[in-house]
Image: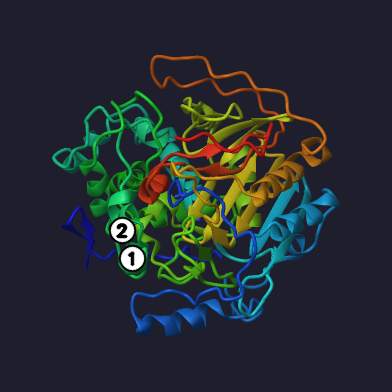
């Protein structure tokens, strides 16, 4: 099979995916906007499939009750007591999560940790038709949160002296030079999105440019070869010279996966599993080995800013099109465990962690979004900086952040995406649920201190102007809360998908995000 790019077929060779052994992770991309519908429609469509034959196995997978979804003794058995019980973090978290659902999100699940205290909760439905409830431990496609895992894997190789962070990617992958890879692109510029390499997503889903979701349906069961995805991105006009400026691109992180494989001699999935997932002690984080999610999960409803109406279920989908940029499945508690391991030194030595937290500025971003490091955003709030990532694939949104000392961590997953409407210029319009999600994350990370309902946040200083994308030193660790909601605002749906994220302001969550 092939994906069509401007009328030219680009073969996507089948590539085997493995599931993380003995474990329960674009924005596949930058489809980072968390989405929902103002009022759940009674007639939500059944899961789309390219052919009628595909509908039966999909329904069988997504309708399994949460108590039946995993057999006893498997990696997806019931979570331990520490995950099932609420801690004494904040009595307001149940209410703030419920507010997300009441604002229009079909289903939301969240987990928060402060030191040894843990909380988790869920609100809403996993299936609109049956009203099966969501549960806190549901397995979830976390999209671009995968990028942080991929960056950690490469930084481990940097620490071992097997790869030079400022060395040329072409030294390891010379076969990509004829396809358009600039030899000046470094490993660092891949990880902080300053390579100038365009995103492959508009080419991989070309119908979105014409206002049609056809290519989303057509690609549901197709297997995309990473090399083919990279060639789609390299064929697009560069977004700038290497090192010049930040420009979010999933192509960077697919190249990072190819780099992992070339250096280690194993698959990227195997290496990330062994060196990151297993080292962090994660039980339910894995690369799916089929279009289906293992274990209990929600249906995942996509609207694409009104292009898909009523919203459709995309919980069954081949994630080969995001690979090391956004294919991981995880749980909210596992994401918090990952951040704990990252910041307590179990995954990276201090030198590599410092490099990870050095940021480059993001043009036209809100004052709270102060930069992007190596696989992490840095976001400021009244209680200090937070590091983490947002993620979104069709129907599934995630926000996961941590303080740099790892003491305060929170994550939220949503099973409904790109619910917002667009104005005449293609800008995403704010929705009441956006504010509800922001408030929940603030409370989860900062407690009552993070409540912005009674006072405006102090303005954050703007980034100093710089000639290029020079890295900024990491700041001292402080507990903090992020503004967790990104948005894209481009005239065409395809470019909204590929655009880098901007985040809603913590100072005024009702203010429309700036166009990009």
Lower sequence index among marks 1 and 2: 2
For disc 1, the marked residue is 214
Quadrant where the image shows the C terminus? top left
Query: Residue 92's mark?
Result: none
Which residue sits at x=40%, y=61%? 319
Image location (x, y in percent) of residue 380: 64, 30
Q: How many marks?
A: 2
Q: What element carries label 2?
A: helix
Q: Please state if 13 lies on the left or on the right of 99 as rendered.
A: left
Q: Nearer the viewer, residue 111 or 369?
A: 369
Q: Residue at x 64, y 44 (%)?
A: 340
Residue 502, position in %: x, y?
A: 52, 37
Q: With respect to residue 450, does 65 lie above or below?
A: below
Image spot of residue 242 (x, y percent): 30, 27
Residue located at (57% from left, 19% from top): 462
The residue carrying pointer 1 sits among few (fewer than 14), some (14 to 19) or many (20 or more) residues within 10 Å by Cα, namely some
Q: In which quarter of the image is residue 468?
A: top left
* SS label for mark 1: helix
Q: Residue at x 48, y 65 (%)?
A: 21
* Marks 1 and 2 close (CB-CB < 8 Å): yes
Q: Mark 2 points at which residue?
A: 207
Q: Can residue 193 be seen in this snapshot?
A: yes
Q: Distance between the residues labelled 1 and 2?
A: 6 Å
């Amino acid at each position: 099979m092939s994906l069509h790019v401007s009328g030219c077929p680009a073969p996507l060779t089948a590539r085997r995916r493995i599931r993380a052994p003995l474990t329960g992770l674009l924005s596949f991309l930058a489809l980072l906007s968390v989405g929902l519908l103002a009022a759940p429609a009674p007639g939500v469509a059944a899961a789309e499939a390219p052919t009628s034959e595909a509908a039966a196995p999909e329904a069988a997978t997504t309708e399994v009750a949460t108590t039946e979804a995993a057999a006893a003794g498997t990696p997806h058995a019931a979570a331990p007591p520490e995950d099932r019980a609420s801690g004494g973090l904040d009595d307001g978290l149940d209410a703030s999560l419920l507010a997300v659902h009441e604002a229009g999100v079909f289903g939301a699940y969240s987990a928060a940790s402060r030191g040894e205290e843990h909380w988790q909760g869920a609100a809403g439905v996993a299936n609109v038709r049956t009203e099966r409830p969501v549960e806190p431990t549901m397995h979830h496609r976390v999209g671009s949160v995968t990028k942080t895992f991929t960056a950690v894997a490469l930084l481990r190789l940097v620490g071992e002296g097997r790869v030079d962070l400022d060395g040329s990617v072409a030294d390891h992958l010379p076969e990509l030079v004829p396809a358009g890879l600039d030899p000046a692109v470094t490993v660092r510029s891949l990880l902080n999105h300053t390579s100038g390499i365009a995103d492959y997503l508009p080419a991989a889903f070309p119908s979105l440019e014409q206002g049609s979701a056809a290519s989303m349906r057509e690609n549901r069961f197709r297997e995309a070869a990473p090399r083919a995805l990279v060639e789609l991105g390299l064929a697009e006009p560069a977004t700038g010279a290497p090192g010049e400026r930040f420009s979010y691109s999933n192509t960077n992180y697919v190249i990072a996966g190819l780099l992992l494989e070339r250096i280690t001699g194993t698959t990227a999935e195997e290496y990330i599993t062994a060196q990151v997932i297993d080292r962090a002690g994660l039980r339910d984080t894995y690369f799916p080995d089929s279009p289906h999610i293992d274990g209990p999960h929600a249906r995942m409803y996509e609207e694409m800013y009104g292009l898909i109406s009523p919203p459709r279920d995309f919980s069954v989908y081949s994630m080969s099109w995001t690979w090391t940029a956004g294919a991981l499945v995880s749980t909210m508690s596992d994401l918090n465990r990952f951040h704990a391991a990252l910041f307590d030194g179990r995954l990276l030595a201090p030198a590599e962690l410092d490099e990870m937290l050095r940021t480059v500025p993001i043009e036209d971003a809100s004052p709270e979004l102060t930069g992007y490091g190596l696989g992490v955003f840095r976001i400021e709030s009244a209680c200090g900086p937070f590091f983490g990532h947002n993620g979104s694939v069709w129907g599934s949104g995630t926000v996961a952040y941590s303080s740099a000392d790892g003491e305060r961590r929170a994550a939220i997953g949503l099973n409904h995406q790109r619910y917002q409407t667009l104005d005449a210029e293609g800008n995403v319009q704010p929705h009441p649920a956006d504010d509800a999600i922001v408030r929940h994350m603030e409370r989860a990370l900062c407690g009552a201190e993070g409540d912005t309902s009674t006072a405006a946040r102090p303005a954050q200083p703007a980034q100093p102007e710089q000639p290029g994308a020079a890295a900024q030193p990491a700041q001292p660790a402080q507990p903090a809360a992020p503004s967790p909601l990104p948005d894209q605002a481009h005239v065409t749906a395809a470019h909204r998908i590929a655009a880098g994220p901007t985040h809603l302001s913590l100072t005024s969550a009702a203010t429309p995000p700036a166009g990009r």
